[in-house]
Image: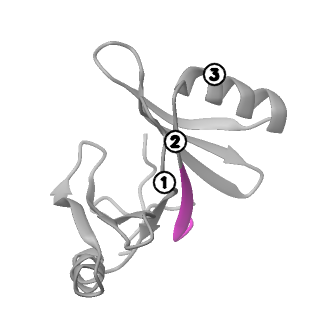
Amino acid sequence: MSYKPDGYPDVSAYLMVRDGGAALDFIQRCFDAEVKRKHLTDNGRIDHAEVVIGDSLVMLGEVKEPGAAHLHVYLADPERALNRGRAAGGVVIAEMERKPDGDMRGGIRAPDGTVWWVARSLAAGSAKG
């Protein structure tokens, strides 16, 4: 069993944007991107979305004040990476937790401010939706 879903790369760019709807519209119109997943908050804003551009996957989420770069990494052992990142001076911003999409995911902010989301799919091999 794989540690990531079929068709997903190990590393994906994760954009934190002010207006997720506008970002998705632009990405679709500019790059002929396909929306693979889209989860909305209770008030209809973009909580998480994934778009496919050619052979690449870009993830995005909506925040009030965009800041540091975010990257999403599928790993066989994300807890090990989270612990190693903490030992290397990173600050865990989200402990490992099972998410509604079936992933175990945690987040760590590196000393340079970059946020790394590490995950393992618990439903690897199946299409996410």
Pointer 2 and pointer 3: residues touching (CB < 8 Å)?
no
Mark 3 residue type: Ala
Q: Looking at the image, which residue sits at the far front?
A: 112
Mark 2 residue type: Leu
Pointer 1 and pointer 3: residues touching (CB < 8 Å)?
no
- Image quadrant in which you'd find residue 22: top right
| Other residues around mark 2 within 10 Å, as few (<14) / some (14–19) / many (≥20) | many
| Other residues around mark 3 within 10 Å, as few (<14) / some (14–19) / many (≥20) | few
Q: Which residue is mark 1?
A: 68
Task: Answer left or right for 74 relative to 13.
Answer: left
Q: Residue 11, relative to residue 47: is it above or below?
A: below
Task: Give, as a single range, the part of the protein colored magenta.
Answer: 9-14
Q: Which residue is mark 2?
A: 60
Mark 1 residue type: Ala
Q: Residue 1, relative to residue 42: is it above or below?
A: below
Q: Residue 129, relative to residue 41: is it above or below?
A: below
| Other residues around mark 1 within 10 Å, as few (<14) / some (14–19) / many (≥20) | few
Q: Is residue 8 visible?
A: no
Q: Which residue is mark 3?
A: 22
- Mark earlier in primary sequence (1, 2): 2
Distance, label 2 to label 3, CA atoms, is 12 Å
Q: Residue at x 27, y 86 (%)?
A: 84
The circle drawn on residue 127 is none
Q: Residue at x 32, y 22 (%)?
A: 41
Which structural element holds mark 1? loop
Task: Answer left or right for 108 relative to 35.
Answer: left
73 inside magenta stretch: no
Q: Position of residue 126 (x, y in %)?
A: 41, 55
- Mark earlier in primary sequence (2, 3): 3
